[in-house]
Image: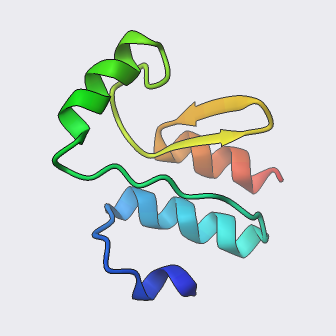
Amino acid sequence: WSWWSNSVTYSFYTLICRLALDLAGIEYTEKIISFSEWPDKKVQFIANGTLPFGQLPMLHIDGMDIVQSTSILRYLSNK
């Protein structure tokens, strides 16, 4: 797993979503938001409706933005 050796610290929820993507063979592009830029990005994403709950991870797939790791995993399990 190429992501295992990455020097970025991931939450458990992000890791299980990434693992599900890898196991399903779904290619993805990761966008990392640093802790220092998160407060500003969070306000921006809530305001524009990208992150309705103000939480990560978020998966953009099939024209949808899916938030909440359980929802992401549930969607991926049907792929």
Residue 49 relative to residue 35: left or right: right
Residue 13 relative to residue 79: left or right: left
Q: Residue at x 16, y 47 (%)?
A: 36
Instruction: Name above or below for residue 35 compared with residue 18.
Output: above
Q: Nearer the viewer, residue 15 or 70?
A: 15
Q: Quadrant for residue 61, please give it.
A: top right
Q: Nearer the viewer, residue 37 or 58?
A: 37
Instruction: Name above or below for residue 37 compared with residue 1.
Output: above
Instruction: Name above or below for residue 25 compared with residue 34.
Output: below
Q: Nearer the viewer, residue 50 or 19?
A: 50
Q: Position of residue 51 (x, y in %)?
A: 44, 25
Number of numbered markers: 0
Residue 55 relative to residue 2: left or right: left
Residue 75 relative to residue 70: left or right: right
* Quarter in which the N terminus is drawn: bottom right
Q: Position of residue 29 (x, y in %)?
A: 62, 58
Instruction: Name above or below for residue 25 compared with residue 47.
Output: below
Q: Residue at x 52, y 45 (%)?
A: 70
Q: Quadrant for residue 14, please give it.
A: bottom left
Q: Residue at x 31, y 71 (%)?
A: 8
Q: Residue at x 49, y 65 (%)?
A: 16
Colour scheme shown: rainbow
